Amino acid sequence: MNGSDIAGYLWRGETFCPTCIHDLFVPYELIGDPERSTEEILDRAAAEQGINRHDEKTSGSARFPQPLYSDDVTSADTCFFCGTALTTGA
């Protein structure tokens, strides 16, 4: 994992691993499609809500998950949902 890899997400004041954010945002019709990445799922969810998820001015972490990069997390950062450490490369 290098410093620009996404280690997790910040959403509504909590940290989440990519797997849990994927599962929380995957639309019903794609549940059985494991080929969709977390980023693809978030891009689709943002588009459906009219959010430009790459513009922090319009989509802060209170409104939509923001990526946390491996350089931004420590061993103390864990997923709020499953408890996995974000430094494990989930």
Image (cartoon, rainbow, N blue to C red):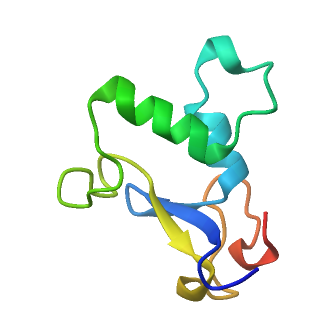
Q: Residue at x 39, y 63 (%)?
A: 13
Q: Residue at x 69, y 42 (%)?
A: 37
Residue 1 vs residue 77, the one in the foreground? 1
Residue 52 vs residue 67, the one in the foreground? 52
Q: Is residue 82 above or below residue 34?
A: below
Say which quadrant the C terminus sits in. Answer: bottom right
Residue 2: quadrant of the picture: bottom right
Q: Is residue 27 above or below residue 80?
A: above
Say which quadrant the N terminus sits in. Answer: bottom right
Q: Residue furthest top?
A: 29
Q: Is residue 70 above or below residue 40?
A: below
Q: Residue furthest left?
A: 57
Quick check: 36 left or right of 80?
right
Horizontal and vertical percent position of residue 38: 64, 45
Quick check: 41 left or right of 59?
right
Horizontal and vertical percent position of residue 74: 63, 88
Quick check: 83 left or right of 67?
right
Q: Residue at x 38, y 55 (%)?
A: 12
Q: Residue at x 26, y 30 (%)?
A: 50
Horizontal and vertical percent position of residue 33: 78, 23
Horizontal and vertical percent position of residue 19: 72, 49
How many marks the image carries: the answer is 0
